[in-house]
Amino acid sequence: METKTAVRALAGLAQDNRLGIFRYLVTRGPEGAVVGEISEHTGLSGSNLSFHLKGLVQAGLAESFAEGRYIRYRANFPAMRELIDYLTEHCCEGQPEQCRPPKCF
């Protein structure tokens, strides 16, 4: 993943409503959810929700597709994995065991 792509994805998540929507879509798995379900879960109005979903799609973190008269959204899991891999690519420079937090007693 290029830095520019990572920045765009992170910017897409840098708002509480979009982050909440994305996290909800992740819980829905590959099936995703239609706009009405997302609205019911988030409490956002249609126009507000549409604005945030558009932002997630433009950031590459969500996908939309027509399903009859509805639009279904789902998390873009490959893009999410790429972002996570990009962020942790050089975790502790080859010693990932050092990246784990210490155990609390």
Image (cartoon, helix red, strand yellow):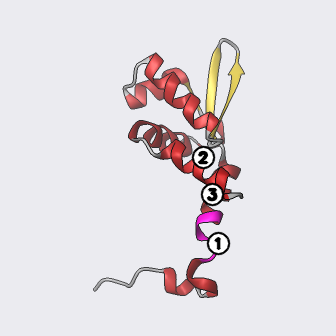
- The spot of residue 95 in percent (x, y) is 59, 88
- The spot of residue 5 in percent (x, y) is 66, 50
Q: Residue at x 64, y 64 (%)?
A: 86
The residue labelled by disc 1 is: 89
Q: How many marks overall?
A: 3
Q: Residue at x 68, y 50 (%)?
A: 79
Q: Residue furthest front?
A: 4
Which mark's residue is nearer the viewer, 2 or 1? Answer: 2
Distance (Cα) linking label 2 and label 1: 18 Å
Q: Name the amino acid, label 1.
A: Glu
Q: Nearer the viewer, residue 16 or 100?
A: 16
Distance (Cα) linking label 3 and label 2: 10 Å
The first of marks 3 and 1 along the sequence is 3
Any part of residue 37 in sight: no
Residue neighbourhood size for the residue with mark 2, other residues' Cα within 10 Å, grouped as few (<14), some (14–19), many (≥20): some
Any part of residue 28 in sight: yes
- Secondary element under disc 3, as helix, strand or loop, is helix
The first of marks 2 and 1 along the sequence is 2
Q: Name the amino acid, label 3.
A: Leu
Q: Residue at x 71, y 57 (%)?
A: 2
Which mark's residue is nearer the viewer, 3 or 2? Answer: 2
Q: Is the N terminus in the top left, top right, bottom left or bottom right quadrant?
A: bottom right
- Secondary element under disc 2, as helix, strand or loop, is helix
The residue labelled by disc 2 is: 8
The first of marks 3 and 2 along the sequence is 2
Q: Nearer the viewer, residue 47 or 103?
A: 47
Q: Nearer the viewer, residue 13 or 73?
A: 13
- Secondary element under disc 1, as helix, strand or loop, is loop
Q: Which mark is residue 83?
A: 3
Q: Name the amino acid, label 2.
A: Arg
Residue 96 magenta: no
